[in-house]
Amino acid sequence: MSGKERDFIKEAFDTNWVVPLGPNVNGFEEDLKQFIGAQNEVVALSAGTAAVHLALIACGVNPGDEVIVQSFTFCASSHPITYLGAKPVFVDSEMDTWNMDPDLLEVAIKDRIEKTGKKPKAIVPVYLYGMPAKINEIIAIAEKYDIPVIEDAAEGFGSKYNGQMCGTFGKYGVLSFNGNKMITTSGGGALITSSAEDKKEIMFYATQARESYPYYQHEKIGYNYRMSNICAGIGRGQMTVAEAHIDHHKHVQALYEELLKDVQGIKLHCQPETGEYDSNYWLCTVTLDPTLKVNGQENVYKAVVQGAVGGAAGVTHDTKDLHTDCEPNPNVEAMRIFLDAKGIESRPLWKPMHKQPVYANAVAYTNGVSESLFKVGLCLPSGPCVTDDDVRYIIDCIKEAIL
Ligand SMILES: *Cc1c(COP(=O)(O)O)cnc(C)c1O
């Protein structure tokens, strides 16, 4: 944490604004508005997950409704759908950006209307690892069927498509300021709305849905989802380095690209070179050719892993099984273990939601893309603390692991 964050937090204490509203919250929202450079409004919230939840409520999602969501994502894109008693309908990705396949999206919409007689209530595309989706095509299809789009830009803070910030194309845009995201407020998120009226509605639900009476009067169920003034102070400090963070992530990606150029069997995931895409490269990812031989690959999946991915996130369930029906290839797991022994934390790609046991009964429109990527992919260290020397060391270790 730099001096700026400390200054804003100290001010919050000095002025007695240690609550979930106040000058830092307003200031942070103003900073975010400036940053996204659009006619949108922003509501600061306690988490990105809360932002997804409130956007769904604002789209009128009720028990039994269906919501279309990208399958290749972190669980926070889809879990809030189930919080509401609604049903996620998963749509697979295309190979260029790894995000929602617009063609498959239309297939899914048509089929849902035919099978249920009802339109899905919302569409949730994701900017996976910061990569812009084919958002123009997605928006065009959404408009054709008049279905609101909630962009999950939790990983895509500062990414642009055609010069426009991700999160500002749809009716709502989700941002996350969790500890591992592009900028952090320790924990937090925001919802980008397209009008001041929508912002008011989101604020209403984020602060326990209070009606304007001199006493607590409730006609709707609300949530305690507003960002605290302390967290917003961290956010205001982080906004002063947001551009620098994004530049650094792009720099790390460029260095990976240069150093991996001649490494056979390992491919860095890069944005399409058609000019529209400007990824923040929040996470740099590679795919391993299934024929690549990696040191130790015959010995993987023989012992249960202690702790889960993102172990810092808390308690995980113990498991007795060594395998699931969809897991990274042995050479990928061997690379992860090899790098781990060298002090380098890498991770598998996010496992598609339609392959998660908790969503075994959910409807899914698949084309094999996300499942095949999950089996061959690995996330490499990409954070603000990764130096050029770190990247060189990581690539040296990857080369050493290859037989
Ligand atoms: C992190 C993340 C979220 C949720 O954000 P939190 O602030 O952690 O609740 C939502 N969607 C995606 C794709 C994410 O990566």
Image (spheres, helix red, strand yellow):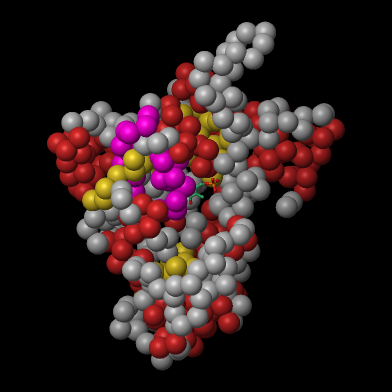
Please give left or right for residue 29 compared with residue 262 in the image: right
In this view, the residue farthest toward the top is 214
Query: Can residue 133 be seen by looking at this rendering?
Result: no
In this view, the residue farthest toward the left is 114
Quadrant in which residue 43 is drawn: top right
The x, y position of residue 17, in whole percent, is: 77, 29
In the figure, 231 relative to 268: above or below?
above
Please give left or right for residue 290 compared with residue 255 in the image: left
Q: Is residue 76 magenta?
A: yes
The x, y position of residue 83, in whole percent, is: 45, 39
In the figure, 187 relative to 206: above or below?
below
Which quadrant is home to the C terminus?
bottom left
Q: Residue at x 51, y 76 (%)?
A: 304
Q: Is residue 336 magenta?
A: no
In this view, the residue farthest toward the right is 14
Which span of residues is magenta-colored?
61-82
The x, y position of residue 374, in whole percent, is: 36, 66
